[in-house]
Image: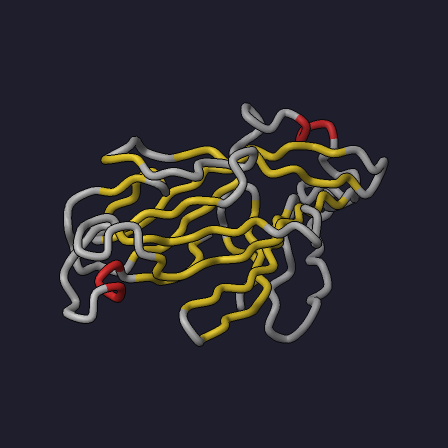
Amino acid sequence: HSQGVFNPKDADPLGSESSGYFVVLDDTIGPTTRTWWGGDYATLHVPLFNSCNNDVTVASIKAQQRACGSTWEMNAGRGTNDCDHNLVLKLNDVSLNPWMEQYEHSGCVFQSNPSSPIIFHFRRWHSPYSNALIGRIVLDFELLFATKDPTKAPSALPSLSPSITPPPDQCSITACSCEIGQVDYRGTLAVTNTGLPCQRW
């Protein structure tokens, strides 16, 4: 799901165009340094605690940024632009997260450490003000596995609240706090492991 809206020109009082990039602060999670041009995506490795047995499972997450109608590696800078940049995260499929098959329909909850949220910085690429911090995103991750196979249980799940759509199987909830300057955005959203929304802000 897409997180945060940042514009690299906000670092320059004159509003000059620039590319931008996202990094995490923990190199065991993902990239902490920038790269020029880059590829299609970076990979995050997020440790999750299993509610069923207290084991720690590492989730593989595709991390990209989106700007000017294109999507690429989250920590890569490209040509100067005046577009907004978004962080785009998606849980990789079972080929990179084989543990998901084991816990399908288990009712287990996988959650990152709430005392150690994943922190992202968005920075400007080009001079002047190269590497200037534009904003940050603070995320907690939670992956829920339904206890029933939806193909064998056609009846709809009860709605959790008037504004929340009943979550499909394997629903990944991301509780996030996105801080841009003096503005603090907080909310909870959920996406399936294929990236389809099942709960919005």
Compared to 4, does 88 lie above or below? Answer: above
Residue at 61% from the left image edge and 59% from the top image edge: 175
Q: Residue furthest right?
A: 53
**Residue 200 placed where, x, y %?**
53, 65
Residue at 54% from the left image edge and 57% from the top image edge: 138
Residue at 56% from the left image edge and 57% from the top image edge: 198
| Figure quadrant of residue 15 | bottom left
Could you say which is closer to the camera, residue 123 or residue 176? Answer: 123
Compared to 60, does 4 lie above or below? Answer: below
Q: Is residue 134 left or right of residue 51?
A: left
Could you say which is closer to the camera, residue 150 or residue 178? Answer: 178
Compared to 109, does 136 lie above or below? Answer: below
| Figure quadrant of residue 108 | top right
The coloring applied to the image is: secondary structure
Could you say which is closer to the camera, residue 81 or residue 101? Answer: 81
**Residue 46 placed where, x, y %?**
60, 38
Q: Is residue 169 left or right of residue 3?
A: right
Q: Is residue 180 left or right of residue 127?
A: right
**Residue 153 placed where, x, y %?**
73, 47
Q: Is residue 36 left or right of residue 4?
A: left
**Residue 170 placed where, x, y %?**
65, 44
Residue at 55% from the left image edge and 26% from the top image edge: 96
